[in-house]
Every structure is written in C-alpha cells, then in structure tokens.
Amino acid sequence: MGKSKKGSVADEGKPADAARPMGPTGGIDFSEAGVEAAAAQVQLGHVSKPHARDAWERAKPWMLEQRQKLEGLGWAPVDKARTELYVLKRMAPHGSFTDDGFVYVRVPAKFIDFTRSAKARDASADGEEAELKRRGIRSKKRENAPSHALNDPLVWKIKIDGAESTEADRVPNVALDVVQPMENIMYLVMTLAPGLIRLHASRKDAMLPGSHTQETRDDPVAPSVRHSAIFAASEQLARVLPPAFWFKRNSEHLRKILGDAEFEAAEAAANDEERATSRILGDVAERTWEEMLPPPEQKKKKSKKAAAAAAANNHSATDSSPLAGSPMEAPPTAIAV
C-alpha cells in the first residue's frame, strides 16, 4: 500500500450523496512490458515459456468447452486461420463502431501467439506501414497476422470487487466483469504468464470498507443521522493474477493443466494480496457529515397513508377473489389410453 496521511476533516451539513465515491476508471493492459515486474511480484518459480506452452496444450479441451458455452450465450463461430483454436463473434454493443459491426474473441492454437500479440510494435514498422497505406499499398503480412490481444473494451469489462463491502477486512480490488467462459479464458492466460495481462482501475474519493459508522440524533425538531467514515482522495488498483475464488472454483481442471505442485503454488500466490494485486491510497482522512431526517410528525403521516393504501389494496384483492361457497370448476379428468 502506498503512503497515506490520516487526519480529521469535518464536513458538517454535507449531504450523504456527496460522500459516495466517484465512479471508477480503468482498463486492461495487454503487453509483454509488464512480465518482468510481475515475475518479481508473484514469485512463482514454475512460470516460464515452456511451462506455458505445455500447459496450454493440456488446456485445449477445457478451452473448447468455453467455446461451446459462449456459443450458447449468443457468440457465433467464424472461419479461423490454421493457427487458431477458434474465433467467435457477436454484434458490437449498441452505439459502438467497429469495422464490420462485430466484436471478436480469438483463441490461438499455440500460447506463443498471445505473447506475440503483446509485443510492442516497432516504430519503424509503423512508419513503413503508414507509408505503404499513403501510397495505396495494402500490407498482406499485417492483414494475415490477427491479434489475439484480450483487451478490447467492447468485449472485456472490469469492475472493482468489494467496493461497497461493509467488512473491515475486505480489501477492494479490480476483477473481470464478464461471463464465466470468458473469465476462464482470460484468467488462464493470466495464470500461465503473469503480467502479460494487467487489470487496473482507479477512483477518487473512495470510502474504505468497514470504516463507515452512523449515529442517529433523536431531535424532536430536526432529527438527523451523523455519519463518519475514512476516505482516500484516490485509490489505484491493479491485478496480475486471477482472484483466489477462481482457482478454488476450477481446481479440478487447473490441477490437470498446471500440475498439482504448480496449481498449489499459484493458488497460494492468488491468496496473497501483495503477490496477486497492488493497491495505492492517496491522502487518507476521516470525514463526517449530517443526513437530515423528516420530523416525527411527517413520519406518522406517512405511516398512516401507507396503512390506508395497504388496506385498500387488500380490500380490492378480496373483492376480486372467488366468493366463499360459490361453485368451483372441477379439474379435468385424466383419460387413460
């Protein structure tokens, strides 16, 4: 956790809505640049390109199961290149613009194609391609090299998990916000090559979980609730390994894919927040604010109105029900054939 300052800031009279955290921003980095730093963070000795290659081969049957599930959720199969395990597409979200109106999920046959897609593009190659485009020459080499990046914002969504928790020991962090089959694809790649994919999010004015307390003031004229909580002016979250629950939920498959010892090591790292995630808070301070409540007389009036409305609904329901003692239609008789 980053450096933070703790003080006391009184915000008397501030409405409760002003104490809510601002919406998060973030995304998914898909780059080979973060692999080295992630290796030092996760401390998993078995992680290597040969292990990722062999584990991906063992994972193919499970990855094909994810394809079937996605097809059941509306994704359609697409003609694939010989280097791909499968390609799926579906209509792009309403209001978004793509080349052909679709978004794609491309899963390569070999794990190295994920790594190749994450390599930084050479600036000279970009310049050469731009020059060819200016002269009206299409680069077949570029066209025939589809990207297997897993960071299209129209496809892959993230969320801050635990942001609204009231548990003091629940630490918020960023996680995927997609259906389970897509979660399995992305999280497996993160497991085999930590740092190749980095989930990140940030938000301002974030309330720390478990810090919110409230005290009701029963003033007969102006009753109120006094709130107190600890806020961080900023919160930055990142993840390089899947959440621990994902390892537990898929332990049977992952043991076969990774190996027993490797699975247990990866699961232990996922359970360690310092190895799997990072969280930096800025300018931490306590804040208090008042929420005004309606006077007791108004509460009584509202209660009477609510009771009268409930009684009217009950009376209406009684009138529409069959009268007691009225003949009821007999159920149809079954006919044996």
Image: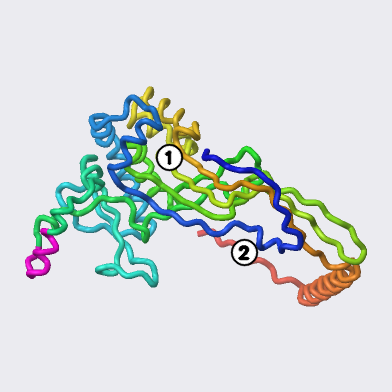
Vertical position of residue 305 compared to residue 116: above or below = below
**Secondary structure of the residue carrying numbered label 2:** loop
Which residue is located at x 30 percent, y 37 percent?
59
- Return the residue nearer the eye: 209 or 289: 289
Which residue is located at x 37 percent, y 61 percent?
154
| Residue 125: percent from left, percent from top | 13, 54
| Residue 120: percent from left, percent from top | 23, 48
Quick check: 14 left or right of 257?
right
User: Would you name the residue on which mark 2 appears?
Assistant: 333
Given the image, on which type of amino acid does mark 2 rest? Thr
| Residue 50: percent from left, percent from top | 23, 30
Quick check: 279 left or right of 17?
left
User: Most extreme residue toward the top, as rendered?
Assistant: 261
Picture quadrant where residue 10 is located: bottom right
Quick check: 302 left or right of 62?
right
- Return the residue nearer the eye: 193 or 264: 193
Chief secondary structure of the magenta portion:
helix
User: Would you name the residue on which mark 1 appears?
Assistant: 242
**Secondary structure of the residue carrying numbered label 1:** loop
Q: How is the image coloured?
A: rainbow
Question: In this rendering, does residue 220 appear at all?
Answer: yes
Of mark 2 and mark 1, the one earlier in the sequence is 1
Q: CA distance from mark 2 to mark 1?
A: 58 Å
Question: In this rendering, does residue 325 appear at all?
Answer: no
Which residue is located at x 83 percent, y 67 percent?
294
Which residue is located at x 81 percent, y 51 percent?
215
Query: Residue 126: within the magenta?
Result: no
| Residue 183: percent from left, percent from top | 40, 47
Query: Residue 135: within the magenta?
Result: yes
Given the image, on which type of amino acid does mark 1 rest? Pro
Range of the magenta residues? 128-138
Mark in front: 2 vs 1:
1
